[in-house]
Structures are given as C-alpha cells and as structure tokens.
Image (tube, rainbow, N blue to C red):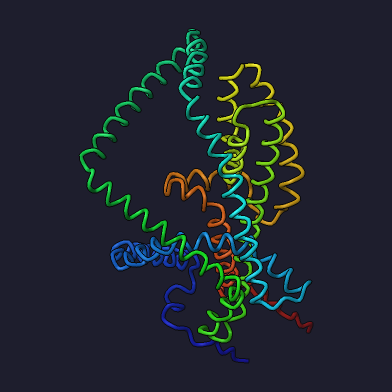
Amino acid sequence: MNNLEPTKNWYQRLFGGNNVLRLLTIILLILVIVYLFDKIGFVFAPIGVFLGAVGAPIIIASVLYYLLNPLKLALMKRLKFPKTLAVATVLAVLVLVIVLILSIVIPFIVNQISALIKAWPDIFKNIQHWVDILLKDPRFANVRDYLTQANSNFSKDLTSWGQKYLTNGIDSVSHFASALTHVGTTLIATPFMLFYLLKDGNRMPHYMAQFLPATARSSWLNLLTEMNTQIANYVRGQLTVAFAVMIMFAIGWSIIGLPYAIVLAIAAGLFNLIPVLGSFIAQIPAILIALFVDPKMVLFVLLVVAIEQPIEGHLISPLILGDSMKIHPVTVIVVLLSASSLFGLMGVIFAIPGYAVLKVLVTHIYQWWHDNSALFNEPEVVVEEVKND
C-alpha cells in the first residue's frame, strides 16, 4: 500500500527535520523584530504623547470603575435599578464620599501634617542624637563612614539641584503651568470616563471582538475576561487590604499614644499598596517618630506591628485576595525590583498588575502555540504485524 505524504512548503522542507534549528530560527526572527521596533521608535512617539495626556484620567477612572462596578451591579440585580439610574446613584455616592473626605478628614490630616512639619527640626535633632550615640561604637565605624559620605553626596546633589532650578527658572514655571493644566484636565476628564466605563464598560470586549475573524472571537473574549478578572481582583483586593491596614494602625497607634498616629497610619496604608516590601517600609516613619518621643515607645510601636501583621497576613489578605493572583512571593520581589530600576515609582505601582496581565497573555499565546504546533505532537508508534507462517 502506498503512503501519500502531504505536500510540504519550503519552510517545512528546509527546517522540518530539525526542531532545534526551527526554534533558533523563531528566536532569531523575534530578535530581528525587536531590533526593527527599536530603530523605528520615532514612529511610536505620538502614541507616547497621547498616553501621557490621557493616561492619568484613564488609570484613575479604571481604578474607580473596578471599585464601584460591584455596587452598580448590586443595585441592578437586587434593587432592579435601570443601568443609567444605577450609574447615577453610584456617582452620587462617590461625590458624597469625596465631599465628606474633603470637609472632615482632610482638615484633620492637614493639621497633623502641619504639626509634624513644625516639630520636625526637634524630631530630627533627637534622632540624630541617638544615631550619634549608636555610631560612636567602634563596631559601627564602617557604617559611620558610609553615612558621612552619603550625607556629603546628598548635600552636593541638593546644591546642584537648587542651582539648576534657579538658573532655569522660566522653564520651571512653564513646567509647573503645564503640570497644573494637566491636573485640571485630569479632574475634568475623569468623571466623564468613569461614567461611560460604568455605563458601557462591559460592551467594550464584544465591540473589539467584532473586528476579528469569527473563529478568533471566543479566544479573544476569554483572554480579555481573564485579564479583567486579574486586574479587578488586584485593584479591589489591594485597596481593601490597604484600607484595613490603615484602620488597624490608626487604632493601635492612637491607643499607645503615638503622635501623628492618623497621618502615620495613612502613610502605612499607602505603603502597603506595594506588595511584600511595602508593609516593612511602612513601619520606618512610625519608628522614627517613636524614637523622638521616647525609646520605650518603639517597643509599643513594634507590639502594634506584631499584632497587626498576623491579622493582615493570615486573616485579611487571604480572605480578600485569596489565591487569585497566583504569583509566588519571590517572583513579586523580582518583578518589583526590576520595575523600580526600569520605571521608578510608576513601575513599582503598576509592576504586579502589569505582570499579571502579561502572564495571562503569554499563557494564552503558549497554549495556542502548543495546540497548533507540530513540536508538541506525540510521535506516532508504528506497530508492525508479525505474521506467522
């Protein structure tokens, strides 16, 4: 019986018999594409300008959307509100919350910050006194030399920075005016974007899918759904945990009599938005303030931290975040360190959700490759029949 083999194209004839060579060819093509994109980077410059202009309103509106969308859905399902009325109600609640924060919380925080700024010279002197006592120990000679050099470098950098901005005063004014205009534009554009996200956000994936071939629409919708779930879980979870940490520290530090407890608790909640590392960084301001008041106060601050950390790590975070992100802590640290080196503060803020989205995208691409590539096909086992004479 004649076995008819299917006709192979030139690529299959050239590389079909060597999987390693095929893989190297694919890698080479990817590197060539990356190189070409780097050389024509000027083509994408307008995109960067556009994202710089609309990026802030989109990000703020998206965060508020993920926070408020569950409330909108609850009003529609449980109270049978029409969509437009549900969106209007949610926005009214948001405005009420903002007004309460501006009228009650902000003045209190401003007073505490003003008191902290006035007391800062004394706080700094007291901290410097304790540091000097500690560094007089010969065992800390290397640390003392390092801090002296760092202080000298900081003074030089501060002087050069001041000279630079004094000599470029007109440019500084123009940059300030540009920043002020950008803030105003953001404040105006964000409510409109939020309204339309709440109203029509669920239609966007289907609208985008209609431009794709019919066979690819289902995969596209699954991909966007999984990305949306990852981002929603992260935004809601991190903000909720940060708020819980803020409340716990505000209560704990107020009980022990730590000055500026509310401001320090808010700072701790904001630092907690940085995964893994943020909870440790958040303790530094409280410990420094406690050193100024009384070294014994540091023990009470650490006692509050010792009570808060297990509650957050073993009760609140698992209950709110669960295992939704499925990212190993070591991976989180590596991603944060890499993103901070490459993109600074913005990289730290968006590193984990960006990694989660990229992970979903790469997983789907790999699954498509696995399903359509001959590299992963199991070799056929040919069984010969043994005929007995």
Farthest residue to the bottom: give it.
1
- Residue 179: image x %, image y %? 36, 53
- Residue at x-position 79% and y-position 82%: 388
- Residue 141: image x %, image y %? 45, 12
Farthest residue to the left: give it.
167
The quadrant of the rendering that contains the C terminus is bottom right
Image height check: is 132 above or below 58?
above
The quadrant of the rendering that contains the N terminus is bottom right
Which of the 4 quarters of the picture holds residue 207? Answer: bottom right
- Residue at x-position 37% and y-position 23%: 151
Residue nearest the viewer, comparing 44 with 335: 44
Residue nearest the viewer, comparing 155 with 109: 109
Residue nearest the viewer, comparing 228 with 236: 236
- Residue at x-position 51% and y-position 60%: 59
Residue 153 visible to the viewer? yes
- Residue 334: image x %, image y %? 53, 45
Left or right side of 218 for 181? left
- Residue 146: image x %, image y %? 41, 20
Left or right side of 302 for 13? left
Which of the 4 quarters of the picture holds residue 370? Answer: bottom right
Which of the 4 quarters of the picture holds residue 186? Answer: bottom left
- Residue at x-position 59% and y-position 54%: 99
Left or right side of 71 for 154? left
Residue 330 visible to the viewer? no
- Tally the numbered discs: 0
Image height check: is 288 above or below 65?
above
